[in-house]
Amino acid sequence: ENTKPYIVHRLDKETSGVLIIAKTREYAQLFTSLFRIRKIHKTYIALTHGKVSIKVKTLKDDLVIFEKDKKIIQKAISHIRILKSSSDFSYVELNPITGRKHQLRKQLYNIGSPIIGDDKYFINRRADKIKLKSKNLLLHAYKIKFMINNVQYNFKAEYDKEFESFIKKNFRL
């Protein structure tokens, strides 16, 4: 009561999952510094078009953004683990090391496996449109973990029904 929440990091508006919101300015500053020194670890899960190669363990990219007509190149690194795959889709776990805007979406697009439901980074394959109609981006911030004063904190958010039904329908679990 009588406090203002502080958002200390972001998720794309289309992404579901865990988000840290600090109750006080002091904790907001603490979380911001933990993010800066990469002591907060996030795990995402995504459903993608295409079969991601099991050989791919790390995604390293130079992502390009433009600010006021100035081209900026940012290094982006994420670890990837294939949870399940079929000839048409992959169910992957992602751990971003860097935190760039649209990082996971761009990186998966760059390897030819855009996230299902992504209207910004997609490969216009007619077969994908026929096989699947998803209104939602199937990218989910599944876990977040960090340590404060030698206490480990772990938070998880389960994915929604659409995510779950897609997994059940397309993969034998």
Image (cartoon, rainbow, N blue to C red):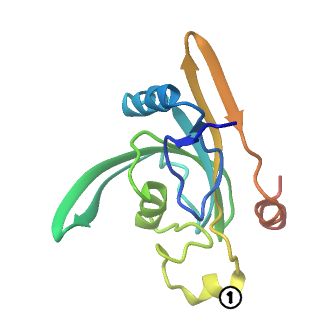
Q: Position of residue 106 (x, y in %)?
A: 42, 63
Q: How many marks?
A: 1
Q: Is residue 92 visible?
A: no
User: Which class describes the residues within 10 Å of circle 1: few (<14), some (14-19), or many (20+)?
Assistant: few
- Which secondary structure lies at badge 1? helix
Q: Quadrant of residue 18?
A: top right
Q: Is residue 145 above or below residue 93?
A: above
Q: Is residue 148 above or below residue 141?
A: above
In the picture provided, is 161 more to the left or to the right than 135? Answer: right
Q: Position of residue 119 (x, y in %)?
A: 53, 77
The extreme top residue here reads: 150
Q: Quadrant of residue 157?
A: top right
What amino acid is at disc 1?
Answer: Ile
Q: Is residue 163 above or below residue 58?
A: below
Circle 1 residue: 130
Q: Position of residue 41 (x, y in %)?
A: 53, 33
At x 67%, y 71%, the residue is 136
Q: Position of residue 97 (x, y in %)?
A: 42, 39
At x 69%, y 64%, the residue is 86
At x 60%, y 33%, the residue is 23
Q: Is residue 56 visible?
A: yes
Relative depth, front residue between 123 and 21: 21
Relative depth, front residue between 43 and 9: 9
Quadrant into which the N terminus falls? top right
Relative depth, front residue between 147 and 74: 147
In the picture provided, is 104 more to the left or to the right than 1? Answer: left
The extreme left residue here reads: 70
